[in-house]
Image (spheres, grey):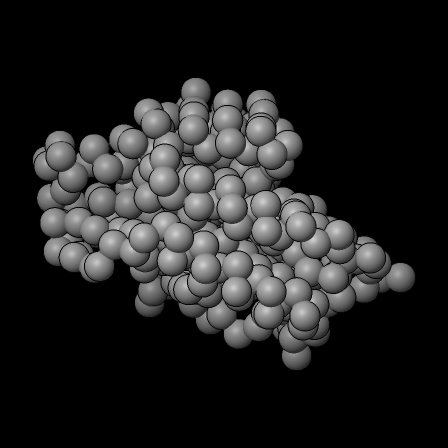
């Protein structure tokens, strides 16, 4: 059975800021033919060329460290950008290798992909990643066992809670830091031709309102708000400014913590062991 984990003493609520650095794999994993569409791939290049540098400067201004979920392919193909994240103190976590969806994939194949991703990230950081977010949050029933076998401390994929919890089913602790599509930048801002994906683009102020209202509710309930962001989506000037307003709002409370995913997972587990 899953076991809800308390936040550390003195922390009423937490805001987790994560960026999925999908780069070109966001597009090639949706349709391999996108490898031959330079304009489509240029969405992904924005991650590396513009989005990440702007985000790093913003995080520095706020003296914040965030968690960056990086597909192994991105680490292998853009090592300088990912090294920069690591050098500036941010957490690098696992986000598949080619960003392929793992739905229905057998255990052996999924293990191979997870190991490929670990090798790529280890080349940058020198250590195994603590956390795993599946591309498109696609988890199989055997995924928890694989994560435990590979020494992961946490997953950030599930939408069944507003509190961190410990997954049942194994002796080795595996923490869940829950997510939600309403806290992902994709549904508000992502537009593309291939695949056709013409959503209404939301005004950043509307997104600020949705996220700050949700955070107020979570704060009353002692919850955790995990933002799933993408440098190629949120790394636009107006959207980054909106994110700063969400950060400022969270920091207006005296009992809110803005840790990395790894820091929160460790702190919650330490508290549970007391
Ligand atoms: Zn992704």
Residue displayed at 13% across by 32% down:
38
Whether residue 180 is situated above or below residue 270 in the rendered picture: below
Residue displayed at 21% across by 51% down:
191
User: Residue 135: in sight, yes or no?
Assistant: no
Q: Is residue 168 left or right of residue 184?
A: right
Q: How many marks?
A: 0
Whether residue 160 is situated above or below residue 153 in the rendered picture: below
Residue displayed at 16% across by 57% down:
198
Q: Nearer the viewer, residue 235 or 27?
A: 235
Q: Position of residue 101 (x, y in %)?
A: 32, 57
Whether residue 141 is situated above or below residue 102 in the rendered picture: below
Quadrant of the image containing the N terminus: bottom right
Q: Position of residue 178 (x, y in %)?
A: 55, 64
Q: Nearer the viewer, residue 231 or 3?
A: 231
Q: Is residue 136 left or right of residue 170?
A: left
Q: Nearer the viewer, residue 49 or 167?
A: 49
Q: Position of residue 100 (x, y in %)?
A: 31, 51
Q: Position of residue 227 (x, y in %)?
A: 50, 53
Residue displayed at 34% across by 27% down:
50
* Residue farthest top in this picture: 80
Q: Nearer the viewer, residue 45 or 184?
A: 184
């Amino acid at each position: 059975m899953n076991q809800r984990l308390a936040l550390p003493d003195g922390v009423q609520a937490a805001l987790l800021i994560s960026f999925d650095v999908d780069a070109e794999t966001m597009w090639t994993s949706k349709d391999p033919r996108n490898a031959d569409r330079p304009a489509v791939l240029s969405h992904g290049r924005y991650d590396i060329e513009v989005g990440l540098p702007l985000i790093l400067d913003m995080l520095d201004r706020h003296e914040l460290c965030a968690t960056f979920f990086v597909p192994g392919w991105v680490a292998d193909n853009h090592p300088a950008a990912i090294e920069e994240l690591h050098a500036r103190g941010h957490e690098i976590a696992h986000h598949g290798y080619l960003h392929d969806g793992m739905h229905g994939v057998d255990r052996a194949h999924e293990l191979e992909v997870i190991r490929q991703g670990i090798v790529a990230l280890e080349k940058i950081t020198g250590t195994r990643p603590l956390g795993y977010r599946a591309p498109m949050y696609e988890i199989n029933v055997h995924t928890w066992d694989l994560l435990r076998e590979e020494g992961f401390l946490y997953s950030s994929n599930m939408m069944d809670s507003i509190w961190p919890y410990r997954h049942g089913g194994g002796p080795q602790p595996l923490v869940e830091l829950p997510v939600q599509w309403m806290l992902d930048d994709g549904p508000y801002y992502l537009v593309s031709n291939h695949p056709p994906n013409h959503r209404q683009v939301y005004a950043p102020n509307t997104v600020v309102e949705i996220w700050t209202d949700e955070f107020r509710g979570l704060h009353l309930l002692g919850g955790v708000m995990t933002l799933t962001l993408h440098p190629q989506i949120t790394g636009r000037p107006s959207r980054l400014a909106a994110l700063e307003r969400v950060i400022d709002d969270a920091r207006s409370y005296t009992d809110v913590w803005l840790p990395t995913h790894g820091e929160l997972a460790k702190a919650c587990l330490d508290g549970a062991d007391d």
